[in-house]
Image: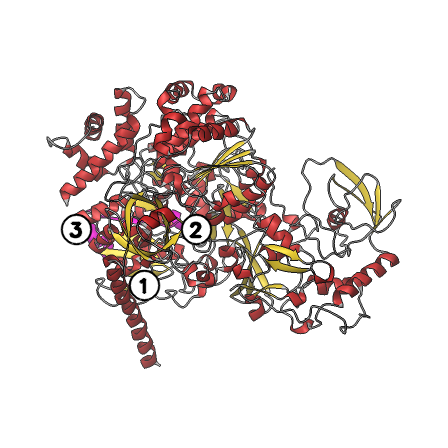
Amino acid sequence: MTLDQDAQLVRMVNQIAANLGGGREPDEAADGVCDHLEKFWARPMKRRVIACLDEADNGLAPLARQAVEPLAERQAG
Amino acid sequence: MIEHFDPRQHGRDLGTPAPAADGAPVRLEIDGVAITVPAGTSVLRAAALADINIPKLCATDSLEAFGSCRLCAVQVEGRRGTPAACTTPVAEGMRVTTQSERLARLRRNVMELYISDHPLDCLTCPANGDCELQDMAGAVGLREVRYGFEGENHLAAESDDSNPYFSFDPSKCIVCSRCVRACEEVQGTFALTIDGRGFDSKVAAGQDQAFMDSECVSCGACVQACPTSTLMEKSVIEAGQPEHSVITTCAYCGVGCSFEAQMKGDQLVRMVPWKGGDANHGHSCVKGRFAFGYATHPDRITTPMIRESIDQPWREVGWEEAIAFAAERLRAIQAEHGRESVGGITSSRCTNEETYLVQKLIRAAFGNNNTDTCARVCHSPTGYGLKTTLGESAGTQTFDSVMQADAIIVIGANPTDAHPVFGSLMRKRLRQGASLIVADPRRIDLLKTPHLADAQHLPLRPGTNVALINALAHVVIAEGLEDQDFIAARCDTEAYRAWRDFIIEERHSPEASEAITGVPAEAVRRAARTYATAGNGAIYYGLGVTEHSQGSTMVMGIANLALATGNIGREGVGVNPLRGQNNVQGSCDMGSFPHELPGYQHVADATARGRFEAAWGVTLDDEPGLRIPNMFDAAIEGSFKALYVQGEDIAQSDPNTQHVEAALSSLECLIVQDIFLNETAKYAHVLLPGSSFLEKDGTFTNAERRINRVRRVMPPLAGKADWEVTIDLARALGYPMDYAHPSEIMDEIARLTPTFAGVSYDKLEERGSLQWPCDAEHPDGTPTMHEVDFPIGRGRFAITEYVATEERASRRFPLLLTTGRILSQYNVGAQTRRTDNQVWHDEDVLELHPSDAEVRGIRDGDWLGITSRAGQTVLRARLSERMQPGVVYTTFHHPGSGANVITTDSSDWATNCPEYKVTAVQVEKVSRPSEWQRRFDDFDRRQRQHLAQARDAALQATEVGT
């Protein structure tokens, strides 16, 4: 079940990245995705997706990964 | 033209409609009384305004003057003859006489002829006490009828009782044409006509058919318009005339019609749409006017019930025991699994005050932000998309604004079925000549509007909305049709430049996107030109926009198009989401979403949160909570254990039913508050009786941000209104809430929510209704938004990249299923299935194109198995050319249909609003119900038994006791 939940969250971040990626510079897009997660995702969901960063084959698209990394910093701060 | 509520005109019939508001003042004298009225006013109306009541029969102020009965004849100084006051406009210096010997004789003669062909059974007639013919006979002093009944007459004409709600008795008909005109002018269906000529003239439905066999949609406008008992509600025939009435607001769709609930004691005899209602101006549909019987249906739950597990029978208990049981379970679960292991769902059917209390209970007493509402599954993308681009999560106009629109785009909405009263208003405007563009996979009924000249239909493939809206915007920019002045003055320059560079790319041209959308490039170009150059362009949209994986993107795309063409900030234009349920707007406004406090104030905003913390006396979580689909996932995973659901049936309405069922079965405590044992309640441990909208005070907010009063007309069947139950639960959890009346809850909302600062029950009483924002700057509310600026300063264009949905047709699932509603049923059908509305739609069917049917050997009426990657269900086939080949359609009003067994967990990227509108499926002929349906029937039977056992046990206990 846990793996399913992780996969579901990764799928969601990738979907957000695909929608916020177009027509923007990569840094700006990553900021947008990170802001979105910060603003709309519940604490446990953020924790879970941040934890996925440590897994090698987590399935995060490049832009999604680029957004979750700063999210980890913001949440730690 | 914004028509405001005028309390002085309550319940009076002024004979003819108000003229255009800008008419020059005209002075005249009627029976020696001087009066000034706007040009275009009829003499009949001018007299009524001076409280001079000229007899009339064919005239009524909801319909244009007709001049057929001649009862309102008057004399005008300097003119010959006796003109009809209803068709005679006022003129400067005119001197009118309404009472004279000549007029009295004339009117008596007219009445005498009417009565010579009318039954004289007044004492036993259902209209006795409410008959204009009777009133007029009295008014003109009719004392004899010289003609007798020996000659030819209509007294033996047969009644038509085919409609379940009203009867048609032509023997009582005076052929005044009010019903025919109401059907044309108000409803716009044109189902009625006057058949024959002279003495043979009679009212006929359709091609002289029974009402039920005609195209009549049973809106009841004809019944309301009828001055005699010819068209009469069966409820009045049965119960007699009501003795008092209360003005309240309908609890069906997001139009939010005002009604006069006409009562006999605490029995509701009939609902009459109220002319003073600014959302509906006296019109209604078959649901609001007639389908209220569910409120007193024997299936109503009237006693609280509890059980340890869902395979046990229910046990009827008192309120106190049920609340204590629920509170103890919630506390125990939080102690064991943590503060975040519980949550709740507020209801879009309940009042603003009730919704506000449930989210307050969750945030303050549960101590987390795990609150959500059914808007999650319908209009959450509207909230996100409009807030991002325009700065406020709401539609921009009043309903009446459509009467100023020159070009109307309808995207993914079906107003004649889902928002019928607004649909009728839109049709009225279309008959006046506004252009119509419909973007929808189906050929919706709006395209069949009688006397509609030139409609454009863009039949796009499901799931390609964003590609289409980008193509429309591309044309506007590429062909130089944008409103440069508006963009320069009102929009963020940087965001516009970025968007312009994006949208001008050739890949967004109609020619490039034709392969994606399936809509011919030339049709897209024509539609864009129509919208951009018509003058006032207005966009209306529904769930066909939001319920997609790119729902939020599409909402932003719509806002981009309106901004680029300057179609924002005045009457006749705007971005208009048509809300599904009565209080979807209100439930969103009231802080139901996990990331937003009331008034769309983010939980991370320390200033806003601080105000709530101070008022509520608790510390609030600054992180968003779980949304409904996240709750389901967390429940299945095991970290989410208890849920409080008020007035929503997630087990039937949410997608991927088997996933929802698994989630609900995983909960250790499910508390359901509802008026019926709905599908969700079958998984519950605590069942708290809900109260219908007739049983409580409060407010609903409709799709035009209009806050309308809901007034109690009968006591709650179970003894408590929903807001009282939430207060009890909060108290049991150790968080007392102190309100004696919903008005006090509204006062608290006004203190904490800037956009509601000026709202109070007193103000609502005075103004009838208020459209938020209502604050110091706009003390009477805001009919049209963004007139001067946006809440975020300047409008922000958003980049709207088209991303194809993962849900696409394949070899295994070659068809696309899309879902929708039908006029007679409402959402999950819990209410309408318990009324005679069943006669119009007693089962959900699968509509498919004849060519798709032919290759599969399917005939109309065959049983079809519909399979998606989520599940399978079985429905009957209906062949229909409204569908394009490759697309199939069904409704979701009946639980056993299992429409949501097939829909998937695919959802909007920004809000997780489910993608109900696109599911890849295969269909094939089958001979028996699906496995899910057999399981459903079995579970349903068992749960009904559990309920019956509880009722039997309680009955026995009472008998033993006595």
Nearest to the observer: residue B927 or residue B740: B927
Image quadrant holding the C terminus of chain B, namely: bottom left
Identify the residue under disc 2.
B351
In this rendering, would B636 be left or right of B451? Answer: left
Q: Which residues are magenta?
A: B329-356
In the rendered structure, which disc, 3 or 2, sits on the residue that comes first in sequence? Answer: 3
Q: Are marks 2 and 1 in contact (CB under 8 Å)?
A: no
Q: Secondary structure at mark 3?
A: helix
> Considering only vertical position in the picture, is B203 above or below B781?
below
- Answer few, some or many: residues within 10 Å of disc 2's Cα (few below 14, many 20 plus, some between 14 and 19): many
Q: Are marks 3 and 2 in contact (CB under 8 Å)?
A: no
> Considering only vertical position in the picture, is B719 above or below B193?
below
Q: Which mark is residue B336?
A: 3
Q: Position of residue B301 (x, y in %)?
A: 37, 64
In the rendered structure, which disc, 2 or 1, sits on the residue that comes first in sequence? Answer: 1
> Does the image show residue B542?
yes
Q: Secondary structure at mark 1?
A: helix
> Considering only vertical position in the picture, is B433 above or below B709?
above
Identify the residue under disc 1.
B320
Chain to which mark 3 belongs: B
Most extreme residue toward the left is A56
Chain to which mark 1 belongs: B
> Does the image show residue B743?
no
Nearest to the observer: residue B780 or residue B884: B884
Q: Main secondary structure of the magenta part?
A: helix
Q: Position of residue B338 (x, y in %)?
A: 19, 47
Nearest to the observer: residue B855 or residue B541: B855
User: Residue flagged by tag 2: what amino acid is it?
Assistant: Thr
Nearest to the observer: residue B298 or residue B617: B298
Residue B614, quarter of picture: top left
Q: CA distance from mark 2 to mark 1?
A: 23 Å
Q: Position of residue B695 (x, y in %)?
A: 46, 60
